[in-house]
């Protein structure tokens, strides 16, 4: 499609006005006190608790229009046009052998750890099963849940992965260091470890 001569003259004449309209619209949208808020809410929480209070927000922020969308499951800010969301968090599951793990993880994210009790487990396997049952979120070594991750039974939590301060060791008595089976197993084990990524926890 090509403009006629008259169309080109008209386009040139209105180009400046259209540019001014565009700049004005962008200025309005960039104003932090006005614009549109695309907000995801949980259905029952949103309608029964939040919605009765929204008139107060509208009265105090007349230049902001809220678009509500309901979400029950997971959502992705990168894929959906959402500015914010109100969602219900999962409880933190704790390992009895690593009582400070969650505090360290939140510090690693630059956040303050929430207070309050949570279920406690002695075994990673039990904690993993609790996660799969929907009981909460746990910090688990990736090397121990690789199968569950591949099958989609578990998913990494948002945030930066954290390298554990602890490690697994092959412990050998001094008098057994030269024992051929021990040496063979040690060499094999080291070869296997080199194939694995760093031992991370989420």
Image (spheres, helix red, strand yellow):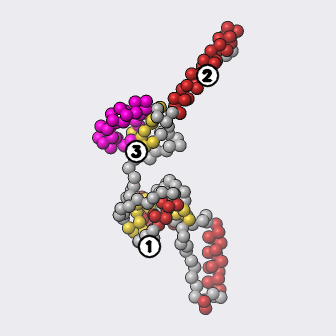
Give the Cα distance between marks 3 and 1: 33 Å
Q: Which comes before the other along the chain, label 3 or label 2?
A: 2
Residue located 45% across and 42% down the image: 84
Find out whether residue 161 is within the magenta segment: no
Proximity of marks 2 and 1: CB atoms separated by less than 8 Å: no
Which residue is under mark 3?
86
Furthest toward the top, the residue is 6
Element type at mark 2: helix
Q: As rendered, which of 101 and 72 lies closer to the eye? A: 101
Q: Nearer the viewer, mark 2 or mark 1?
A: 2
Residue 92 picture location, percent across and down: 40, 60
Which residue is under mark 2?
19
Magenta region: which residues? 41-69
Disc 2 residue crowd, few under 14, some 14–19, many 20+, Cα 10 Å? few
Residue located 48% across and 57% down the image: 111
Give the Cα distance between marks 2 and 1: 64 Å
Find out whether residue 68 is within the magenta segment: yes
Q: Nearer the viewer, mark 3 or mark 1?
A: 3
Q: As rendered, which of 21 and 97 lies closer to the eye? A: 21
Q: Is residue 87 left or right of residue 198?
A: left
Q: Which comes before the other along the chain, label 2 or label 1?
A: 2
Q: Quadrant of residue 50?
A: top left
Vertical order, 198 against 168 (above or below): above
**Residue 178 in view (yes/no):** yes
Disc 1 residue crowd, few under 14, some 14–19, many 20+, Cα 10 Å? few
Q: Nearer the viewer, mark 3 or mark 2?
A: 2
* Main SS of residues in magenta: helix
Residue 193 picture location, percent across and down: 62, 70
Which residue is under mark 1?
97
Disc 3 residue crowd, few under 14, some 14–19, many 20+, Cα 10 Å? some
Vertical order, 13 against 129 (above or below): above
Residue 63 picture location, percent across and down: 43, 30
């Amino acid at each position: 499609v090509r403009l006629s001569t008259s169309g080109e003259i008209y386009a040139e004449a209105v180009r400046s006005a259209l540019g001014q309209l565009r700049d004005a619209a962008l200025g309005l949208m960039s104003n932090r006190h006005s614009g549109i808020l695309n907000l995801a809410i949980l259905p029952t929480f949103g309608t029964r608790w939040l919605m009765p209070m929204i008139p107060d927000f509208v009265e105090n922020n007349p230049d902001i229009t809220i678009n509500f969308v309901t979400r029950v499951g997971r959502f992705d800010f990168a894929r959906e046009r959402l500015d914010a969301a109100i969602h219900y968090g999962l409880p933190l599951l704790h390992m009895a052998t690593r009582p400070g793990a969650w505090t360290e993880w939140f510090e690693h994210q630059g956040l303050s750890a929430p207070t309050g009790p949570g279920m406690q487990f002695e075994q990673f396997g039990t904690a993993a099963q609790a996660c799969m049952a929907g009981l909460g979120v746990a910090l688990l070594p990736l090397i121990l849940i690789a199968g569950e991750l591949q099958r989609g039974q578990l998913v990494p939590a948002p945030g930066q992965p954290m390298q554990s301060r602890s490690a697994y060791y092959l412990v050998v008595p001094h008098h057994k260091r030269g024992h051929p089976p021990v040496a063979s197993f040690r060499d094999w084990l080291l070869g296997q470890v080199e194939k694995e990524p760093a031992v991370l926890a989420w």
